[in-house]
Image (cartoon, rainbow, N blue to C red):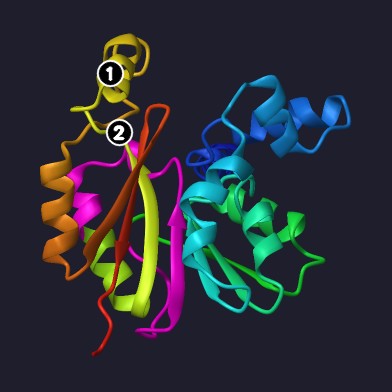
Amino acid sequence: MIERIKTNIIRSYYSKAEGFPRYLKEANKIGMDVNDWIEQKLGWPEALPILKKVAFPYYRDDSIVCELGVGTGRWARHILTKLANGYLYLVDHSPWIVNFLREYFQSNSKVSVYLNDGHSLPFPNDSWIDFVFSDGTFIELNLSFFYLYAQEFFRVLKPSGYCVFDYIDITTPEGWKFFKTQSKQACNRFTYHTPEAVDKVFSGAGLKIIKRHQIGKSMYLVVRKPPLY
């Protein structure tokens, strides 16, 4: 009985971490930073050029920034380079990832890491965040999660604050190609949406659609909480 409980606890701890524990193990074998390993060995798109295009224009060096669905910090480490006088809050639903991030960024006084429930932000205060960023999270979520997070983004963002996230737009050539090539091997992983549906969800939450950036399979949507006046 005790061994079964221990096994269930371990499974629960790793269950939401996806492949990141394995990536860390492989990176450690050859003495690489896990985020460099992910980009160089797995061939994932480099985070920095994408951030320069879709994120850096929307926050300042003194902004309060929140990243949702952080993984091993591949995006966060670059977001921090533009926060000389700001602060970064990292939120993930995986206990393994939260513990990893706390160790990974332990020497940085501008970072705090939080565990969430997978559909809301773990912050009680309203209207205090300048910028929310999420990459690689909404591409796996159905529209109900879009709706719940849209409400949360509107709640925590300051007036005139921005949010940027990516999803897979099935109406684009890139999205359609990814859908056709990945459906067999990843049918239970990725989700596909139309811009009309996504816009309706976020506009209905009170956020204004500002801009779109198509990069690879991902459509990065920029939304803004309207100013007070």
> Disc 1 vs disc 2: Cβ atoms closer than 8 Å?
yes
Please give the name of the residue rendered at 55% of the width and 49% of the height, measured from the top-left corner: 51
For label 2, the SS is loop
Q: Give, as a three-letter code, the residue at label 1.
A: Phe
x 25%, y 19%: residue: 176
Percent of width and height locating residue 120: 33, 64
Residue under the point 75% across and 30% down: 25
* Image vertical order of residue 165 relative to residue 23, above or below: below
**Mark 1 secondary-structure assignment:** helix
Residue 200 vertical position relative to residue 88 in the rendered view, above or below = above
Mark seen at residue 20: none
Examine the image and state in which quarter residue 33 appears: top right
Q: Residue 164 in the image: x percent, y percent? A: 39, 55
Q: Which three-letter amino acid code belongs to the residue tagged 2?
A: Ile
The answer to if 195 sits in the magenta stretch is no
Point out the tag, 1 or 2, that comes first from the N-terminus. Answer: 2
Q: Which residue is mark 2?
A: 168
Front residue (pair 15, 130) = 130
216 shown above or below 204: above
> What is the x, y in percent for residue 71?
57, 45
Tell me how far mark 1 sits from mark 2, CA to CA: 9 Å
Left/right placement of residue 224 relative to residue 50 reads: left
Label 1, on which residue? 179
Query: Going by the image, does 49 lie left or right of 91?
Result: right
Q: Position of residue 53 (x, y in %)?
A: 50, 48
Please give the range of residues in magenta: 120-147
- Quadrant hosting residue 179: top left
Picture residue at 19% right of the left edge, 59% below the top: 202
Question: Residue 127 sits in which quadrant?
Answer: bottom left
